[in-house]
Each structure stands twice: as structure tokens, then as C-alpha cells.
Image (cartoon, rainbow, N blue to C red):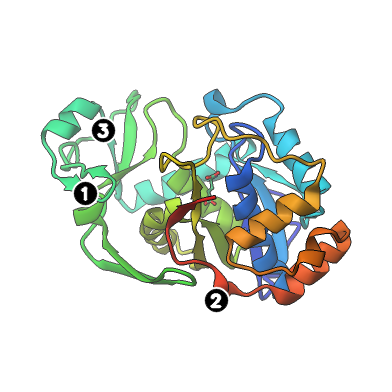
Amino acid sequence: MENAFPLSPVYRGRFAPSPTGPLHFGSLVTAVGSYLEAKSRDGEWLVRIENLDMAREIPGASEEILNTLHLLGMEWDGSVVYQERRQDAYQAALRALEKQDLIYPCSCSRKEIADSSVLGIEGPVYPGTCRDRKHEPEFSGAWRLCTNNDLIEFEDAVQGIRQQRLQRDIGDFVIRRADGVFAYQLAVVVDDAEQGITHVVRGGDLLNSTPRQIHLQKLLGYSIPSYMHLPVVVNPWGEKLSKQTQAAPVDTSHPVLQLVKAIRFLGQTPPPEVSESSLRSFWIWAIENWSREAIPKNMSFMF
Ligand code: GLU
């Protein structure tokens, strides 16, 4: 990665959308929350396109997301990073973990895992069947990371103190999938570290992933950013807005109205005249009046 940010600032945040469709109200809330946290603290705000899984990428979605951010007046610092171009960095991290003898090849099927495991907080806990398996040179299955039962604790800026014991709650997790795609957990940690991210603000659906990321950060010798998880927007059936749940793209013909809706969702209380103001005046008001204390602690709610 080009080293556009040699010195770590006091605050460097990021927005990391997956280009599986256009920006919808749910991703707008995350973008706005991370942008306001950064800007209200005089920080930088970076954008990273998380297109690790090219099979899920919708052609043109990255450009559409970036264009929508631009039309909404959200300018990012530096150049956009694309995960598809970062395979060497992920491979290097995998090697560093291999050198520490912390990863192993695994060819268990989902069914085998489900049949022989207990339920953790995100489904079956991998029972460790392949832990002692030798590294075969031609192996083409998944790679898992060894976990342990040390307590991992962090203080989320909205959700408070969170704790997990990875081996008990999650199990040894995949860091490179059988199809060769690096897992989100590994890539996000490598990218956040290399981009010098100091503060991660993202959707509450990733709260339970954070201990896995902290575990990886420790093993790879990275510093640990601060975390803030925002409530997730769900539809009337309790499903997270996404392309799969047919979330509508953000309507950019009335940018300020969309932005006002997003900050209201985040507990902010803009006076009525803000809805009629220009984009520029909206952002001035929103940055000056941003209150992280007002962000609802619910993990999700409907809009
Ligand atoms: N790419 C993830 C998403 O679109 C976000 C990952 C992150 O912020 O850590 O949900």
C-alpha cells in the first residue's frame, strides 16, 4: 500500500463498505456516524472498499457508493483502498501466524462441524478436529487460527465493556477460506493497522467480531484501535437492511433530508430549519452539535 499517511494522527477513522450493492439507509447511518465522530474530533476519515469476495461484488457498486458519498458532501482523506489489491499483505500476515505455529489446515464440512460441536455466540464452536493436522504442501482447504480461553475485554464507546473467551464463545476461526479468499477478520485487521486507523466506528452487527480482531492484532503486534458500534437499521421483520433484504438505494435528489434522517436515527436532534438548509450548512450544524452520548444503545432498531 502506498504510504500516504506516514504519521499517526490523533484520530483516524474509516468507512469500509462492501460493494455488494448501492449505499442504502443502513450503510448511510454507519458512514455518517463514522464521519461525524472523525470530523467532530478534527480527525481524518478514510474509505476502504471491502471487496475481498469478488463473487459477491456487484459491478459498478464501488463507484456508485463513492459517488453517493460525494453527492452527500462526505469527502474522504487520501486515496480509496481496495481490498482486492491487497492479497500480498494478507498473505504476509498469514505467514507471520504460520511462523508462530498458530494456524492449521482444516477440511471439515459444515455438517461435520455442526454435528460435533456446541453452540457458541455465532453458531457452532469449531471443536478443533484438525488442530494437529500436518501442513501438506498441496492442501486446498480452509485455514483456521488457534484460539485460547484468555479473557478478551474492550470498552466499546457506545455499548460499554464487552468480554469474550474466544475458544469457548467462537472457537478456532477461519482466516483463509477453502476457496482461497482471505477471511474478513484477517483482512480488516491488516488493513486497519496498515492504514493507521485509531478509531473504528461501524455497525453493531460486528460487535461480536471485535474480540477476534483484537486477538489477531495482538498476535500480529499491531496496536488496538478504539471501537464504537452503532445501532443497526433493521426492516419490520427484524432483518438488517442489505441488498439481500432489498434495501432501497439512498435517494440523492434530497441529500439533506437523507442526512437528517440518518442523524436522527443516531439520536441527534436537528432543529427543523436544518432540514431546509444547504448541504454545507447541514454539515456545519451536524459536526458542531454531534453528541455521541445521544447515540441509542440498542443494538438494532427499525426506522
Ligand atoms: N465491510 C463491512 C460491511 O460492509 C464493514 C467492516 C468493518 O467496518 O469492519 O459491513
SS for callout 1: strand
Which amino acid type is marked by label 1?
Gly
Return the residue at label 2: 293
Taking the image as drawn, is residue 102 in sight?
A: yes
Of the residues tagged 1 and 2, which is closer to the observer?
2
For the point 59% across and 58% down, the residue is 265
Q: Is residue 150 above or below residue 97?
A: below
Q: Quadrant of residue 154?
A: bottom left
Q: CA distance from mark 1 to mark 2?
A: 31 Å
Q: Position of residue 167 (x, y in %)?
A: 22, 54
SS for callout 2: helix
Q: Which mark is residue 106?
A: 3
Sequence-wise, the earlier of marks 1 and 3 is: 3
Q: Dot 2 surroundings within 10 Å: few (below 14), some, or many (20 or more)?
A: few
Q: Position of residue 103 (x, y in %)?
A: 31, 45
Q: Are marks 3 and 2 in contact (CB under 8 Å)?
A: no
Pick the residue in front: 203 or 285.
285
Q: Left of 295 or right of it: where is 124?
A: left
Pick the residue in front: 22 or 245.
245
Q: Position of residue 121 (x, y in %)?
A: 26, 51
Which amino acid type is marked by label 3?
Cys
Of the residues tagged 1 and 3, which is closer to the observer?
1
For the point 61% across and 63% down, the residue is 197
Q: Is residue 93 above or below residue 196?
A: above
Q: Left of 251 or right of it: where is 90?
A: left
Pick the residue in front: 179 or 23.
23
Q: Left of 130 or right of it: where is 234?
A: right
Return the residue at label 1: 120
